[in-house]
Amino acid sequence: MKLKAVVTITCIVFAIFSCKQTVPDPIRYNADHCNNCGMTISNPVFAALLFTKKGRTYKFDDIACLMSFKKDNADKAVGASIYLANFIKSNELIPLEKTFLIKGGTIKSPMGGNTLAFDNQASAQHYATEINAEYVTWNSIDKP
Amino acid sequence: MKQLVLFLLSLSFSFLSFAKKLEVGKGKAFSSITRALAAAAEGDTVYVFEGVYKEGNISVSKGVHLIGVHYPVLDGQKKHEILSIKAANTFVSGFIVQHSGYATLDDPGAIKVYNTRDVTLCDNILDDNFFGIYLQYCSNCVIKNNRITSYGVEEQQIGNGIHCWKSDSIQIIANKVTGHRDGIYFEFVTNSIIWRNVTTANIRYGLHFMFSNNDAYISNVFLNNGAGVAVMFTKNVKMFNNTFQENWGDAAYGLFLKEISDSYIFGNRFIRNTSGIHMEGTNRIKVEKNIFEANGWGMKIQASCMDNEIVSNNFIGNTFDISTNGFLVLNTFNGNYWDKYEGYDLDKNKIGDIPYHPLSLFSVIVENNAAAMLLFRSFMVTLLDKSEKIIPSLTPDNFMDHSPLMHSLKL
């Protein structure tokens, strides 16, 4: 009986201390604030987030804010994963590795990042020609 | 002499007669506004009589006066940008403009003004639109007495009430904006004035400035918005006699200053906000003769601010008057009234004889650890605050008002 209680308590303790988050928190539009510029995140098209190794989520209203935050908080950025809003599917965030990016043209984002992300190359190219934007890679825009 | 006057009079009448009057409506010469505009010449007046006009996008490419009689309705059926103004000297007044289209990239507005000047939009009622009035690359425009309402909710995209982008010398006067993302939004707008507007219940900000220098906003009311006003990345902004009220919520504020310099905040009222003013990276600002009443924090001054002067303000009934997250004191406080001041005035000059430390120990602790708020008003915290007042240890000892007033200023 006593052993059972000890085992249960140990399990609970382990459960509590091991509950690191494995997926980032969702962004609540018009409620959450950008962790870099402080503005309320209101345009789902340009949102981005940084999900750290420790399981914390940092939310941004623009890719430019994400980059600036990454630069200022290099310790948090180590091993963190980046998610960007999918332009063609509202309120969906896609991991950076799976994105296709376009920049410039008539895109006007809240903090001047002016970048859109897509989950497939065909629609990225389609929109790039439609709004006169440029097809870019993450490495070309993420300058240290 | 008399002949000359007569001659001049007749001359002026002959000029007047060049401007035609065109009428649109049931039983009038034109049945559609688009057709009337096609027939009109520069300087003509088009009267639109009551009725509902669903003409898709109406483009104004000549400087005409477009006047609604008994509020005719222009309906975009949620598909179109309703009125696109592309000509100088256009005047639009007396319309109900409703149900504009919605798009994520090209920002359709109920009334959008493109690359022109001297446009006046007044006495219109805008209802249920994506963007209300949208100006881009414009100058010398007047937006006056419009009532702009939308029904934005959280988790859904909505445009701004009055949106100005890369414009100059704009006057925004006496409009009412409700339920949009930002009530009034300025990006790259210079030499403009925002006067006597009321913005309520907008989702993000009542008024939002980005990269907009040399502007003034005077005698506006910002009530119950997501946050009151945000002034960001800007210099030379004058903020006079505004009311910032009831902006409640986590990280909400009456006025948010970020990366702004050389500005003047005078005679405003900050009432019942989570924080009255929140400053980050703010330099050389004078905050004078304002009232801070019943806020959670009167002012939050981040360590990145310097050379700001806070003089002759009333701080009444705030939970915390001032809070900061640093130790360096680079801002000056002088001649304010603090209702928490417990000093005395032996020489009867109405100025307290000992300085006031507006920064309480607990406000510093809460700034670094928000959860500590649980202990607020507990016996220990009160005791700590008292001892800190006598022997400052955790709060910077030179953070003080040297001449606190004994009585509140009549503002």
Image (spheres, coloured by chain):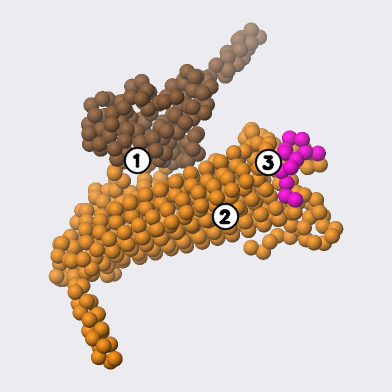
Describe the element under mark 3 as helix, strand or loop. loop
In percent of width and height, residue B234 lies at 48, 47
Determine whether, in the image, residue B282 is placed left or right of residue B172: right
Work out which residue is located at the far top of the displayed protein and give it: A3
Chain hosting mark 1: A
Q: Quadrant of the C terminus of chain B?
A: bottom right
| Residue that appears at 57% across and 55% down | B265
Task: Name chain A's colour.
Answer: brown
Amino acid under disc 2:
Ile
Q: Which residue is mark 3?
A: B329
- Please state the horizontal and vertical placement of residue B223, each as a whole percent of the image: 50, 54
Against B175, residue B12 (above or below) is: below
Q: Is residue B394 magenta?
A: yes
What is the chain letter for disc 2?
Answer: B
Q: Is residue B285 visible?
A: yes
Residue B57 drawn above or below residue B106: below
Q: Is residue B6 left or right of residue B298?
A: left
Name the residue tied to disc 1. A108
In the image, what residue occupies the spot 77% across and 58% down?
Answer: B351
In this view, the mark in front (3 or 1) = 3
The magenta span reads B391-402
Question: Residue at image x 29%, y 48%?
Answer: B108
Looking at the figure, which quarter contains the N terminus of chain B? bottom left
Indicate yes or no whether the magenta region holds residue B277. no
Crowd rating for badge 2 (residues with CA inside 10 Å; few <14, some 14–19, many 20+): some
**Circle 1 sits in a helix, a strand or a loop, which is it?**
loop
